[in-house]
Structures are given as structure tokens and as C-alpha cells.
Image: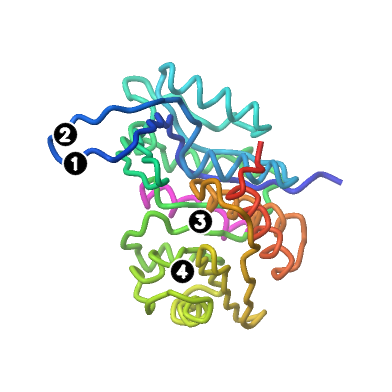
Amino acid sequence: MTEPVVLVVGSLHYDIMVEAQTLPRRDETAVGSRWYPKFGGKGGNQAVAARRAGAVARLCGAVGDDDFGRFLRERLRAGGVDDRFVAEVDGAGSGMSVAIVDAAGDYAATIVSGANLLISPDALREAALWDGVAMLVLQNEVPEAVNLAAAGQARARGIRTLLNAAPSRPMSAEFTALVDILVVNAVEAEMMGAGVVATLGGAAEAARDLANPFSTVIVTAGAQGLAAWSGSEGALLVPARKVAAVSSHGAGDAFIGTLAARLAKGDSFAAACDAASASAARHVAGLVP
């Protein structure tokens, strides 16, 4: 049998990471100790995570015709992701970011979206893009018009859509009506109108608060774990695994990619959430290659 495909429509960023003792204040020139390039963008990270979790992963996105774009496509291929539907946009720079990380692990970043803002909604109509797709994954780092086109195509084909609503932004009723599974963290849940999420119980209340119009909602609460509400499955709580934290940066993308992969492969909702939680914990512990 053909393996199910997780299709991710989303962003690609060339991340420049800078390590420094402290974050600079306004008008201050701080001295860093190290910098390095990193593959990034929620779309790219989640596609690689889905492939690592055992699904066939495909990405639809855009890069510029530049060195950053070539780096991003090489890393996608190295991660086993199908990049045939990543467009190269003439005259546009690839998406990128600069992040400064201090000795305590706190960071500040600036993102330049570049070619990610130029993904054509028309690209979502290509029949080959949807070949074998069992799950669509979206985020909010590309224009809503792109997400709307993707979700509309998925609904017409009977494919579930998972939205990681990050970063938080207003979304149209037309778009949210096409989303089957919403995943947000504590801050994003609060920004969408839920109550304060400080505990696993608070995450469970937030998931219920956000359940309309979404049929399934997952609220992740960092070291507390996750809570979910589904009209068909009811409430679900998954406490976080206790690990020695190395870095939480990117753990959310590991969670999303694994969740999508396991659902696409036919796992139950509870089993997929547990596997995704375990994947995020491994990422936080620095156990992801």
C-alpha cells in the first residue's frame, strides 16, 4: 500500500542564530560569542518532523533564487521531504530571521518573511500536489489567502486540515470553518479569547472555550503537558514527560509534525497526542538529530 502523505503548506526561513551573554538594550551594541545558520520556518520544521515520525512529507512554499533558498531546499531534501512544490520567486529574497540567544536561554528575534509572502494560492490547485495526501498542515506564517486556498482544496478532497495558529492573528470565519484540528500554545489560546492558561486544568478549560467552530482543539502548556477537546473524543489530558531541558526552541514544531504523521498513519487521537508529546520532550532534551 502507498504510504499516506502529510502535506505542509507553510514558511521556510534561513535562521541566523547569535549567542551572547545578554540581549542588547535599545541603542546598545552587544558582543556575541558565536553565530551559526539554522534551517527554520514553521512549515519546513514541521515537514521535517513529520518525515522523522514516519510519514511521507511534502512541502508547498516559496524561496528566493538565492543562497538562502538553496540552503533551505538542500536541508529539506536531507530531511527526506518532497520539495517539488517549493517555488523559486525571481526578484524576492528568501525568508530569514536573526535571533539572539542569551546565557539564560531567552531570545529575541526579527523575521523577514520575503518569498513566504509570495506563495501563489493558484499553486494549491495542482492535482499532483494532493496525490496520496492524508493530512494538511497549516500555520500563520504565510498569508491567509494561501491557507484558505489550501484548506478549501483539502475539504473538497475529504482531507483533514490541522492548523497551528502561530503566530496568533485574526482569522476569517470562512477559513476557520475549514479547519478540523486547531493547535495553539497557552499564549495563543489566551490571545484567541480563552482564559489564562497556567495549569493543565486551565489548558483543558481553554480547549473547551475554543471548541467552536473547531471540532478538535489542542492547547499545549509547555512543561505542564497538553489538553484537548474533541466533539467526538471528549476531553484528553496528557501530562508532559519530565526531561532535563536543553532548549525548547522548535519543540512545538516537533509536536505538530509528529501529531500530523501519526494521525495520517491511522493512530487514534489519544495515541497520536501521546506520541507528539514524547517527540516534543525529546526535542527539549536535545535528543533530536
- SS at circle 2: loop
Mark whose residue sits in front, 1 or 4: 1
Residue on which the image places disc 2: 28
Q: Earlier in the sequence, mark 3 or mark 1?
A: 1
Residue on which the image places disc 1: 25
Query: What residue is drawn where x is 43% and y is 29%?
Result: 14
Does the magenta run of residues contain 155? yes
Residues at marks 2 and 1 touching, judged by CB atoms closer than 8 Å:
yes
Mark whose residue sits in front, 3 or 1: 1
Separation of residues labelled 3 and 2 (CA atoms): 44 Å
238 or 271: nearer the eye? Answer: 238
Separation of residues labelled 4 and 3 (CA atoms): 9 Å
- Residue type indicated by callout 4: Ala
Say above or below: 92 vs 231. above
The residue range painted magenta reads 143-159
- Can you tell which quarter of the image residue 215 is in? bottom right
Query: What residue is drawn where x is 59% and y is 30%?
Result: 76
Checking the image for residue 151, the label placed there is: 3
Residues at marks 4 and 2 touching, judged by CB atoms closer than 8 Å:
no
* Relative side of 91 to 14, left or right: left
Q: Residues within 10 Å of mark 1 (few under 14, many from 20)?
A: few
Residue on which the image places disc 4: 177
Mark whose residue sits in front, 4 or 2: 2
Separation of residues labelled 3 and 1 (CA atoms): 42 Å
- Residue type indicated by callout 3: Ala
Q: Residues within 10 Å of mark 3 (few under 14, many from 20)?
A: many
